[in-house]
Image (cartoon, rainbow, N blue to C red):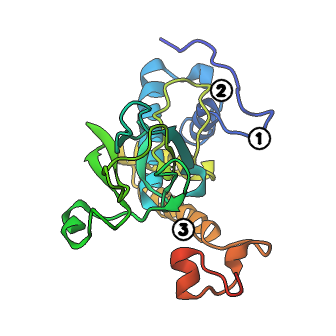
Amino acid sequence: MFLASRGEGGSENMSTSVDDIQSRVAAVVDQNEDTDDIQTSDYSLRLKYINRRERMWSEIGKWQSLYKEYNCLASTSTGNCSVALPDDFRMIASSPKITYDGTNTNVFPEIRGQEEARFSKASDKYVKVLGNKHSGFTLVVNPATTSRQMASGASINVPYFSVPTSHASPSNVVICPNPDYLVQGTIADIWEAREDARFQGAKVEANLILQNMMEFENTPSEAAYDDRVRTVDQARSNFRWGE
């Protein structure tokens, strides 16, 4: 039984679709790049490998392609200090900006829950993240206001790193900035499952691609503000001399 035509999505705008990845994998593994010739069961299995490789990639670093910002308002009726974070939340990327009293906006540092005893709820402004990926994450804000709540409708900006959504459709576009890692990693996984000794070389190539991605990600462009050496104060609180 063969899978019906899936289309080539993503080739015109330079993005890479799941079907593109499947084609490139098949070109090596099957010596046939036509995804219409891949059996349904093989296509589904390889899709699992592709999703697994993208999850592995996402967990290795703080990738800019996974950076997002969540903007919301505190409950207009109670100024609730607990904020449900998006389903794709992984971790806070930088200190949230919160207009805690309806007028003033501050940067709130993140602390760990077990360290909260070291801080004053009456005078220290901070946030902590509770929960897990199964039950969901919640941002708890300590605004250090008299009522211990934020002003009703207080704005909240949370920069965060997301987790990639599992791909289900051939037209889905992969997030990994270098799709060659997904291709080579999937080939390695297929050959390893088949006990084909070539999987070892394929794994090495996949890891080299991953290392190159990490180096590129962590090397700022010549126009970037981060291409200069920053002081400790600048790195921690965006402090700049003369301002």
Residue that label 2 marks: 34
Residue 211: mark: 3
199 and 52: which one is in front?
52
56 and 5: which one is in front?
56
The secondary element bearing badge 3 is classed as helix
> Residue 140: x percent and y percent?
32, 49
> Residue 205: x percent and y percent?
53, 62
Q: Which residue is found at the position 26% from the left and 36% from the top?
A: 135
Give the mark toward the camera: 2 or 3: 3
Which amino acid is tagged 1?
Met
Residue 14: mark: 1
> Residue 152: x percent and y percent?
44, 38
| Rendered position, 6 above or below 126 | above
3D distance between C-alphas at marks 2 and 3: 30 Å
Contact (CB < 8 A) between labels 2 and 3?
no
| Rendered position, 225 above or below 46 | below
Sequence-wise first label, 1 or 3: 1
The secondary element bearing badge 1 is classed as loop
Outermost front residue: 146
**Image quarter of the C terminus:** bottom right
- Circle 1: is it few (<14), some (14-19), or many (20+) Cα within 10 Å? few
| Rendered position, 16 above or below 199 | above
Q: Which residue is found at the position 54% from the left and 84% from the top?
A: 233
41 and 101: which one is in front?
101
Which amino acid is tagged 3?
Gln
3D distance between C-alphas at marks 2 and 1: 19 Å
